Amino acid sequence: MIPAREPIHRPVDAKLLFVRRSGALEHRLRRDFVRLLRPGDLVIANDAATLPASLTGIHVSSGRAVEVRLAARSSLDRARVDRFTAVVLGAGDFRTRTEDRPAPPALNPGDTLMLGQLRATVERQLDHPRLVALYFHGSPQEIWSGFARHGRPIQYAHVPQPLAIYDTWSAIAANPAAFEAPSAGFVLSWAAVASLAARGIGFATVTHAAGLSSTGDPRLDLRFPLDEPYNIPTVTVQAISRARTRGERIVAVGTTVVRALEDAAWANGNLAAGPGLARLKLGPETRLRVVDAILSGTHENGTSHHELLRAFVPGHVLLRMDEQLEACGYRTHEFGDSVLIEAQPQ
């Protein structure tokens, strides 16, 4: 597939591959998305705003330049903003492919990183030279201010121009929680939400801290997705309950929504409102308990997002889907084209 190189959320020529429950494939324009849904469906999107989670600075003991990419935290509580899991890269920026970035200096417990006005301490290495637990010094207000002043969006080389933070926010972005953009939500505009209502289609949200899609290291990428915090509002749980009682479909906008909902219901099938920490990794062995269909970006084979789609379709259908995406020039990555997949019997 072709990487999408322009940070445009809703290009007029955006494509959508519709995978029906029967396994039939249809090529559509993405603006047809609302018309492909049924009255009574409930659409659920991730309202997480993207953090400026890329912080450049110096590894004090070596004097070497580093880039810290925040990757995970244990809670969405805005007051608990001092501890993160982070991926640390050597000198360079997004213009160099992540897989070509140099390794960071050796990171040991107690090492100090100066990241603009922020000071962070390495608490421990997490079984990989690039993955560490970090502790930021200062009050929550000082840390948030440091992110806002010094941070920038995590970015990859396929988009050549520097991204502004608003390039990574969907129209419904609210709580600053995601480390990378929940990009499936770029499909949505407030006009699209109004169209859902006009067609008798419900709309609700969750907040899920979408993590990194790639680190440039295949061994480290195998650990993704990391544990990711989420929150499911009471009104969303109530809307899901009503839809399921009526036999209507739950349509997730993005893999992050699927992970939050399925993790929350995994223990006994009952969905509870409130905060959680997604540890569930979805794949071909997963039995979906909540979600009936997914609107997603196009993902390359071997990525954690691509593996999650195996919970919706058998391998042979996913293979045909990938072949069609490749043959018809679909664009991939966060500003790329989309797929709409109805869950099929596995």
Image (tube, grey):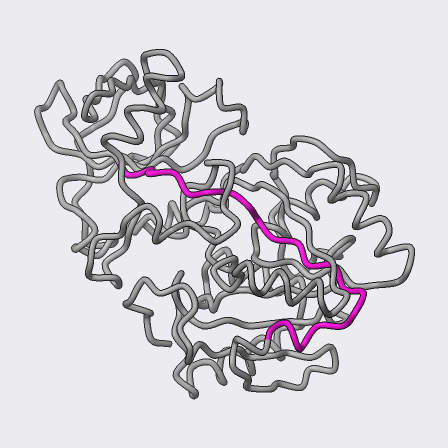
Horizontal and vertical percent position of residue 6 = 29, 67
Residue range of the region highlighted in magenta in the rendering: 33-54
- The x and y percentages for residue 45 are 60, 53
Quadrant location, the N terminus? bottom left
Residue most extreme to the right: 245
Q: Residue at x 8, y 24 (%)?
A: 63
Q: 115 above or below 197? A: above
Residue in front for this viewpoint, 288 or 40: 40
Of residue 72 and residue 140, the one placed in the foreground of this image is 140
Q: Nearer the viewer, residue 53 or 326?
A: 53
Q: Is residue 169 above or below residue 13?
A: above
The quadrant of the image that shows the C terminus is: bottom right
Taking the spot 56% from the left edge, 34% from the top edge, the residue there is: 229
Q: Position of residue 147 (x, y in %)?
A: 31, 29
**Outermost left residue:** 63
At 20% from the left edge and 21% from the top edge, which residue is drawn? 117
Is 46 magenta? The answer is: yes
Q: Is residue 114 magenta?
A: no
Residue shown at the point (22%, 37%) measured from the top left:
67
Rendering coords of residue 124 (x, y %)? 36, 21
